[in-house]
Image (tube, coloured by chain):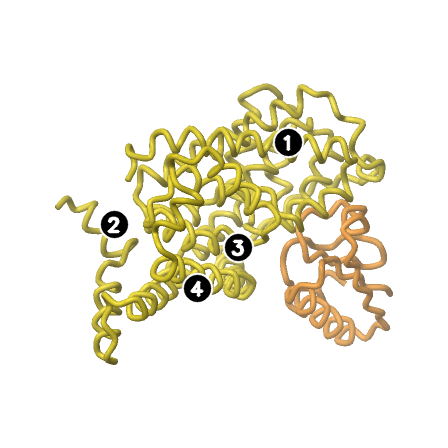
Amino acid sequence: MIIKILGSGCKKCIALGENAKTAAAAVGKEAEIVKVTDIAQIAAYGVMSTPGLVVDEKVLSTGKVLTAEEIGKLL
Amino acid sequence: MSVFGWINDQFLRMTWLNDLVGQGVAGIGLDPASRLGGSVQFFVYDVIKIFLLLSVLIFAISYVQSHFPPERTRAMLGGRSGLGANVLAALLGTLTPFCSCSSIPLFIGFTAAGLPLAITFSFLISSPLVDLASVILLASIFNWPTALAYVAVGLAVAVLGGTVIGKLGMKNQVADFVRTVPVSGNVETMTRRQRVAYARDQVAEIIHRVWPYVLIGIGIGAAIHNWIPQDTITALLGQDKWWAVPLATVVGIPMYADIFGTLPIAEALVGKGVGLGTVLAFMMAVTALSLPSMIMLKRVVRMPLLLTFIGVVSTGILTIGFAFNEITHWFI
């Protein structure tokens, strides 16, 4: 699965990326983390507040840093 | 002295802190009345005061903000038009995150959902210009009438600017990709715990982002306060000089700083006899028309609309500057 982190490279985005990686490993899935930093591309997901979490092109959360457990539930 | 006045002096202006720092400066053998001693006192007092107030204020305001995610704001503004909608947009703009970097995703999201340009621009102008933290800091550095006057004129620029841009019919001046952006309707909900965590994170993030600007601002303020002769300042920016307001605006535009960084400069300039209007024009130019946000905006709108935006906001700032210089004596 492909996990995309939407955000202009802020600290929160990095934290969210780390949590997503942990969560994916915990549920035993092969995950590729992609950082999306371009505002046009971020906007293309209809996301207005970053960081955003997109898994397989589906927006799962916006504007907050989810913990690894929270992401695990969503996966 | 009234109870309100006492609270204001102790908690917002922190007069005790200024006295304490003065004693400390004297304690290490510097005379607070001397140039160097005075600069050190100004610098230390302002650094402690501004960072203390910022932390408390950002926490409180972020907590309130967590109730107004952009999706909810957009839903509140959807389907409205007219002056009332512009006023609402300007007011909601004061509740949004401080950074102008978050304005662009908002612009895209609002426009994609079909909100009129008039409303989107009212929101976009008010967002960096007026926020609750800057209002309380203004009250701390100057006084409440000045702070409230700043809010009033800031909102006026946002409402009028948005209205004018709406009237010009520039809908076709928005980058094409903006219209094809999907609009998701789901609003994230948070528990109280998440809101507290969010507010705490905001404090850390914003302080981390603004501290260099605040320190530079206070440094410049301290220099103006004690090293640049009053004659030089008034010759350049005095109230009797017609060019003071345009000069302050033009100097402010390319600068990028949060409003928190400009406040100590404003404080020092007013102390040297510069008109309140000139100082407000400078602060507004720095926050509402910074170069980095122009560059970002250029990616989502075409040149004529960008230039219109700059023109409308500059006109508003100049008008406010001139008007406030005429009535400075009402406030200070």
Give me the disc on residue B191: 3
Of labels 4 and 2, earlier in sequence is 2
| Disc 2 secondary structure class | helix
| Disc 1 secondary structure class | helix
- Distance CA(mark 4)–CA(mark 2): 25 Å
Q: Residues within 10 Å of mark 4 (few under 14, many from 20)?
A: many
Task: Mark 4 and mark 3 in contact? Answer it, CB < 8 Å.
Answer: no
Which residue in the structure is indicated by mark 2?
B8
Of labels 1 and 4, earlier in sequence is 4
Marks 4/2 same chain: yes
Chain A appears in which tint? orange
Residue A50 location, x and y as percent?
Answer: 67, 55
Which residue in the structure is indicated by mark 1?
B311
Of labels 2 and 1, earlier in sequence is 2
Of labels 4 and 3, earlier in sequence is 3
Q: Which chain is yellow?
A: B
Q: Residues within 10 Å of mark 2 (few under 14, many from 20)?
A: some
Residue B319 location, x and y as percent?
Answer: 49, 28
In this image, B163 relative to B224: left or right? right
Residue at the image point whose x is 71% and y is 59% from the top: A8
Of labels 1 and 3, earlier in sequence is 3
| Disc 3 secondary structure class | loop
Task: Mark 1 and mark 4 in contact? Answer it, CB < 8 Å.
Answer: no
Q: Amino acid at mark 4?
A: Gly
Of tags 4 and 3, the one toward the viewer is 4
Q: Which chain does tag 1 point to?
A: B
Residue at the image point whose x is 44% and y is 39% from the top: B278
Marks 4/3 same chain: yes
